[in-house]
Amino acid sequence: MQICFARRWRHCCFDAKMHVYNQCTFVIAKKELDMLRIEQLTKRYPTGDLALNGVDLEVPERQVVALIGPSGAGKSTLIRCINRLVEPTEGRIWLKDLEITRLHASGLRRARRRIGMIFQEYALVERLTVMENVLSGRLGYVGFWQSWFRRYPQSDIDAAFNLLERVGLVDYVDKRADALSGGQRQRVGIARALLQNPDLLLVDEPTASLDPKTSRQIMRLITELAREHGLPVVINIHDVPLARMFAQRIVGLRSGVIVYDGPPEALVADTLTTIYGEEDWTDSQRADEPDEPVEQELHLPQQALTASG
Amino acid sequence: MPVRISNGVKTWQRYDRASVLKQWAGWLATTVVVLFCWQLIAGATRWEFVADAPQQLAQFLSRAFPPRWSYMNQLWRPLWDTVNIATLGTIIGVAVAFPTAFLAARNTTPHPIIRPLALLIIVVSRSVNSLIWALLLVALLGPGILAGVIAIGLRSIGFVGKLFYEAIEETSIEPVEAIRATGASGMQVLSYAILPQVLPSFAGVTVFRWDINIRESTVIGLVGAGGIGLNLDAAINALQWSRAGMIFISIFVIVLLSEWISARVRKAII
């Protein structure tokens, strides 16, 4: 099997399966604008570190993209550039037809309302209650005094209750966030992001602080909710088997450059070496059965899968 | 280089030779300076005065005790004034320090030019003692409680402002990023992400400052800025030591009480 790495993922050629995959997404991409388009994105930090070097990426509607790569590859910088928590040095980013990189203060705030974000350390406000944390997802839609006195519109409160019900935390509404476990906190983070009613979900290492079982439940919850709401998702993730299991597309980042872009099935040992560097990958590929109950899968040994590449 | 190889044995020491020598030199210089100053002070002291200090103290105590308990009737009002000076001064100080701290904290300042201005307010307030502020204000506003309240308030701005802005700078960035990412405005980020993080330490600092202000407001009367210090000044000037003794006792009790209250409140918050 021949592997060539191209910048534009639709130009990648892997095998017949990959070819069909490309064709399909190409047709979709032709029909309408991608939800997220990134062009020649470059980020150089004031320290001189080049975190991103000319990244191009398109994410169509409803696609779950896992961004993998070694620490320091620029994954976090990339998704933080999308909602401009990190200011890009060069390049352009579009959310549908809105060029995010050209927006100023209030325009940027309005654009951020359309982009939900989930964080590694949950990033909840610990001393606020679960409900307050979830409702903070509506801050972009309410005025300062309204938010100060916690007078949210009833429709927001209804939506918050629905989401809390959906993530299984409806009994914790009045608990303070610091009284929750890691998995529960991440569920609050998910509810907060979705209460924004976003068009795009950015997820930064959602499972890095969680145990394996909770990690899988959280990943399942995120991808299920994204499907229910018809959202495209960009997930930064360290855990390659989890990425394989839950994402429809894998993007490999190394030193600020995209070095792999394709379906999870084509992610073989050679590709992992390209992304992460030399290592024995023979044991790294778990069975791809996302629908099997978590409890049973947990104690299974990792299934060895010899790379065919 | 703390690691050395001699005869094939790797040895490790915390400091290398040069820094050990520097430390010795530092200690030597400190000792010489201390001894020199000691000698200067000793030369300038009238030792016969120091020698009879115990007698002086005994005499002073014998005059002050027993305190004149009946004088307490006249002390309730100045004591109440003292507590009010401390409380109102603390409120003024906190009211000014609160916005100043947000302007001074590196992570919340609206503009890098505003930050030094806010820091200047804090430094000016901190570098002048309450008693000096009171002295100035008595000259400006005339003697009385008002001068005392403002003096205590001015001194509190710096203390409270500095501790407030340090608390703001120590907040974690994650909730701030998360709230910003929802499209919240700057003020909403402050109220939702920063304020809940700093509120406990803000409350603790406020109560602590109130406790300090009780002590300071017992003194500022000495320069005419109201409170029990006025009575103390009058009693000492008139050599009425039994009254002064009564005042000392009442100050002692009120300071103990304020410390007890502030300790309880801080415990409840944290």
Image (tube, coloured by chain):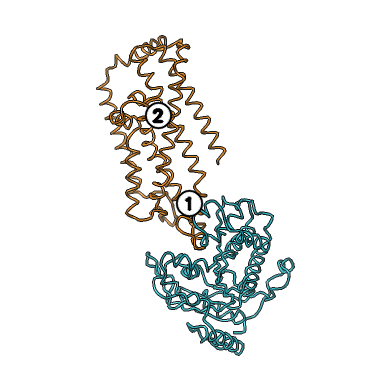
From this view, report whether residue B256 is shown above or below residue B70.
below
The residue lying toward the viewer, choosing from A296 and B82, is B82
The residue lying toward the viewer, choosing from A116 and A279, is A116
The residue lying toward the viewer, choosing from A137 and A287, is A137
Label 1 vs 2, first from the N-terminus? 1
Q: Colour of chain B?
A: orange
SS at circle 2: helix
SS at circle 1: loop
From this view, report whether residue A82 is shown above or below residue B227.
below
Query: On the same chain: label 1 and label 2?
Result: yes
Callout count: 2
Q: Which residue is mark 1?
A: B171
**Amino acid beneath label 1:** Thr
Mark 1 → mark 2, Cα distance in angstroms:
31 Å
Determine whether label 1 and label 2 are within 8 Å by CB: no
Q: Residue at x 47, y 36 (%)?
A: B208
| Numbered tag placed on residue B216 in the rendering | 2
Residue A45 in picture, x, y percent from top left:
39, 66
